[in-house]
Image (tube, rainbow, N blue to C red):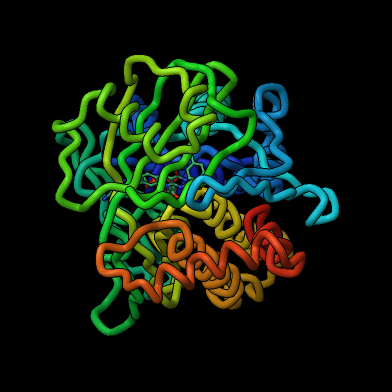
Amino acid sequence: MRTQVAIIGSGPAGLLLGQLLYKAGIDNIVLDRVSKDHILGRIRAGVLEEGTAWLLDKAGVGERLQRENLPHDGFDLVFDDEVHRIDLYNLTGGKRVHVYGQTELTQDLMEAREAESLKTFYEADNVRPHDFDGTSPYVTFEKDGVSQRIDCDFIAGCDGFHGVSRKVVPEGAMQTFEKVYPFGWLGLLADVPPVHEELIYANHSRGFALCSMRSLTRSRYYVQCPLTEKVEDWTADRFWDELRRRLPDKTAQQVTTGPALEMSIAPLRSVVSEPLRFGRLFLAGDAAHIVPPTGAKGLNLAASDVHYLFEALREHYLDSSDAGLDTYSKKALHRIWNAERFSWWMTSVMHRFPDMSIFDRRIQQAEFYQLTHSKAASTALAENYVGLPF
Ligand code: FAS
Ligand code: PHB
């Protein structure tokens, strides 16, 4: 088989890149090691920046998003039961975020790919990039026990944090920067109406809690938990009790409870790999970086990586210029590090760290004071939350 761009990973990054390349007339093949159902069964992000929504529209998959998304002009911060709304819209001169689940946008991208009968291999085993340091890279894999090879011009490693693309980079060619947080997020998805029309981020003595949603009838909640927690030790009832204990009484009384559609624990870490280009292999999305979900940046960073990589590949094929390819890593890393900083900062301000001192706690309270009394401080938060420019 031969294509122009071989894309490893059928998550948001790989599918969005494949769709943009297709719309530009650039041939591509997408490979994933698991099934479509497995990918759609993963409950992940919920908040899209306007840049991400714009890119999905540009890729021709924005129709359901435009129809079904919930535009949000702000969110609540809660510290020791004191509630303060961050007015995103007015602090950023009219920008907002859009609540639309990653599962939905992944489904939209999969359906668009299927409608155009674009070549996609799910449950592809032992996917492996080769010869990307030369001019004739290729990817091998097995499908139903039969060995396959895809000759290509470029390989896009969109295979997430546990993917193969980062693993095949030669020893010493890549630097990885990592910070692991001493807690995780226990998440619950339920078909109950959200407790509030906007998101609520709460810093409570028992730990962080987040009230989010997927629609007006489906809610997504998280509570910070120790890394030793096992999801099988949690029932929905135990989760609801813990969540309500971390919210102001008035809010807690308004929580609608119900059976869990899904419960899972996600560890929190900050990771950046540098650089993002190795000859004709390019990393994008979680394959290149991980952020703690506190700032709702993970999926949105994958989108900006894809924007830069798509523009670079378009320039190569349609303008015979490699300037974009040569600057992809530097350009993407600039936005990545700014999102990493914001995600680290928001995680540091909103969570109770096991080893935090009374000094650390007073600093968190001072941060909250800044955010509730300084327009400059709340504007900086709002500008980062709605997303820095591409
Ligand atoms: P993905 O991980 O989504 O996709 C990578 C794909 O590559 C997968 O389908 C995988 O099967 C495939 N793959 C891996 N190895 C392969 C191989 N060797 N061969 C072939 N295919 C391979 N972000 C937020 O903004 N908010 C959140 O609340 C949030 N919650 C999250 C919870 C969890 C548990 C995780 C892991 C992440 C969460 N994220 C969240 C971040 C998440 O949304 C990612 O940013 C987003 O999925 C990134 O998309 P991709 O880069 O496409 O990576
Ligand atoms: C979610 O709805 O899953 C979500 C929303 C905001 C975040 C993290 C997760 O910061």
Q: Is residue 117 visible in this depiction of the protein? A: no
Q: Which quarter of the figure has residue 171?
A: bottom left
Looking at the picture, how far across and down is residue 259, in whole percent? 33, 15
View extreme (bottom): residue: 172
Count of numbered tags: 0
Q: Residue at x 58, y 32 (%)?
A: 100
Looking at the picture, how far across and down is residue 289, in whole percent? 42, 63
Q: Is residue 63 above or below residue 245?
A: above
* Image side of residue 325 versus residue 389, left or right: left
Looking at the picture, how far across and down is residue 139, in whole percent? 32, 54
| Foreground pick, 177 / 200 | 200
Q: Is residue 240 visible in this depiction of the protein? A: yes
| Foreground pick, 27 / 310 | 310
In the rendered view of the protein, which quadrant contains the N terminus?
Answer: top left
Q: Residue at x 63, y 64 (%)?
A: 312
Q: Residue at x 70, y 26 (%)?
A: 63
In the rendered view of the protein, which quadrant contains the C terminus?
Answer: bottom right
Q: Is residue 54 above or below residue 93?
A: above
